[in-house]
Amino acid sequence: MAPATKRATIYMDAELHRALRLKAAETSQSISEIVNNAVRLALAEDAEDLAAFEERVDEPLVSFEDVLKELKRNGRI
């Protein structure tokens, strides 16, 4: 069974829309397919980022200031 779909209205930059129409024509995909795939990829990247943060939750925090001090102390900057 095909997944349920919902209709949505989005507004995008005219040049992005033009590029999207051209890509759809060249790849024999619908604009909806391309947008759905792009959103899926973006959400999957977010899920990976969240998982990476979760894996590192117990690591000690290091401030940006401390990193700069360490780099300076080691002659890196």
Image (cartoon, helix red, strand yellow):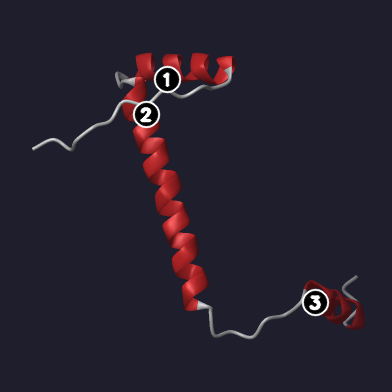
Q: Is residue 57 left or right of residue 61?
A: left
Disc 1, SS: helix
Q: x, y percentage for residue 8?
A: 37, 26
The residue positioned 46% from the left and 20% from the top of the image is 20
The residue positioned 30% from the left and 22% from the top of the image is 29
Q: From what the image shows, is residue 18 above or below residue 3?
A: above
Q: Is residue 35 left or right of residue 60?
A: left
The residue positioned 42% from the left and 58% from the top of the image is 47
Residue bearing the label numbered 3: 67
Give the residue type at disc 2.
Ile
Disc 2, SS: helix
Q: x, y percentage for residue 59?
A: 58, 84
Of the residues under marks 3 and 2, which one precedes in the sequence? 2
Of the residues under marks 1 and 2, which one precedes in the sequence? 1
How packed mark 2 is, by other alpha carbons closer than 10 Å (few <14, some 14-19, many 20 or more), is some
Q: Nearer the viewer, mark 1 or mark 2?
A: 2
Give the residue type at disc 3.
Val
Disc sitting over residue 23 in the figure? 1
Between the residue at mark 3 and the residue at mark 1, the CA separation in whole angstroms equals 44 Å
Quadrant location, the N terminus: top left
Quadrant location, the C terminus: bottom right
Of the residues under marks 3 and 1, which one precedes in the sequence? 1
Give the residue type at disc 1.
Lys
Q: Are the residues at dot 1 and dot 2 in contact (C-beta closer than 8 Å)?
A: yes
Q: Quadrant of residue 62?
A: bottom right
How packed mark 3 is, by other alpha carbons closer than 10 Å (few <14, some 14-19, many 20 or more), is few
* Observer-nearest of 7 and 43: 7
Disc 3, SS: helix
How packed mark 1 is, by other alpha carbons closer than 10 Å (few <14, some 14-19, many 20 or more), is some
Residue bearing the label numbered 2: 34
